[in-house]
Amino acid sequence: MTDTQVKARRPREGVAGGDCMIPARRHQLRELMERHRLEGVLLERPENHAAFLGIRTYNGFSPEPPGRVAVLIPLDDSLPPSIVANRTEVSRIAGEELDSALAYPYSWSEPGQKRSTLENLTAGLRVGADVPGYSAEVAHELLELRASLFPEEIEEYRRLSQDCANIFERCVEFVKPGVPELHIAAWLTSQMLEHNILPALVLVAADDRLAYRHAVPTPKPIARHVQLSVTASRSGLFTSLTRILHFGRPPADLQARQEIAATIDAHAIAWTKPDAVIGHVFRRVAQKFSDCGWPDEWKEHHQGGPTGFSGRELKATAGETAVVKPNQAWAWNPTIGAGVKSEDTVLVTPVGHEIMTCTPLWPTIAVEVDGETIERNGILTAG
């Protein structure tokens, strides 16, 4: 072992990114390597680090572009994975996250060392990677593989989603007229962090700022109406939800538009079934906007898509040819004009749909679609 090669220590309990690869994911990688006759697979995307290794390789609250950390996983199970990253990142990942790995650090001041280190590690080997430049580019296949969740991941997903939903319900006690948007965002953030949840996105919009679909919180105090949206992660999994709270009786127009958003969302969820082509589902959703009297509204904001190891693994579009997978997490998020949005994280199973971010405190709107009743969230009235 050289002075640039470090043996990773056992992960520390409680690290936010997770600490192990589940055997089923290792089996997926082995099958992929055997299918392409590879001797190893190189992962540079944080979502693949989370899915296939159970580790967090970014130091903010949201995954960063690929390239900061590379992990080479050999076909031979008796050989440890190798981590290539600058010394700052290697020290934490090798010290807390990845068990039995070999770390190859380089100086931040000499980024070219990363390329030369990877060239040395992969010399003479047939390697697939989730970035270009190797024997086989397997990014799309890895996306397909991580789409269907395994039982261990589903259980963690349920816990994460319910923890976030519970935080939203408790937030109602904190949110009052006169409280600034930033204070609400700070409360949500602190509560999530206390539960080992990383807030990737926290949006808070009060009153006239509902005109902005992505309203970053400001010092503006609430008067009558507030919309809360969160995307957050734990153990590499991402969940999303949006809720609306109104002080006093909501205006009829606002209530009507929320019901339309809920109707469209319910249809989107019901049509999202295993083996359905995503582009076909999207076109039905776009048509539903027209049926509800808002033909061009879907163009004003993306409509969501599959989630899992990223806030959105991809955004649903009319031309998307990928199919919905069994046991895949989805989050549609239709909006209807200012201040109205319907969003939850849903598990798509072979036998139906499970809304994982349920908030019983909020009133629901029951929508019947093809014999299935989908309950979506209405506006919670307070004060």
Image (cartoon, helix red, strand yellow):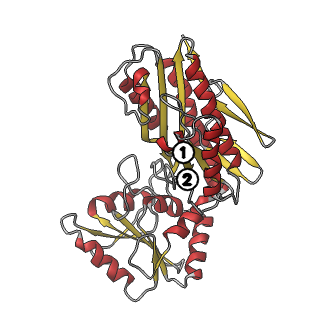
Q: Amino acid at mark 1?
A: Gln
Please state which amino acid type lies under the numbered disc 2.
Ala
Q: Is residue 330 above or below residue 42?
A: above
Mark 1 and mark 2 residues within 8 Å of each other at the beta carbon: yes
Compared to residue 363, the image places residue 15 above or below, namely below
- Residue 371 is drawn in which quadrant? top right
**Secondary structure type for disc 1:** loop
Give the side of residue 160 with respect to residue 230, left or right. Answer: right
From the viewer's side, name the closer residue of 86 and 359: 359
Residue positioned most to the right: 371
**Quadrant of the rendered structure where residue 289 is?**
top right
Tell me the residue at 62%/26% (across/down): 378
Image quadrant holding the N terminus, namely bottom left
In the drawing, what numbered circle is on residue 316? 2
Percent across and percent down for residue 15 are 45, 49
Q: Which residue is mark 1?
A: 303
Any part of residue 356 in sight: no
Q: Residue at x 52, y 52 (%)?
A: 315
> x%, y% of residue 201?
43, 40
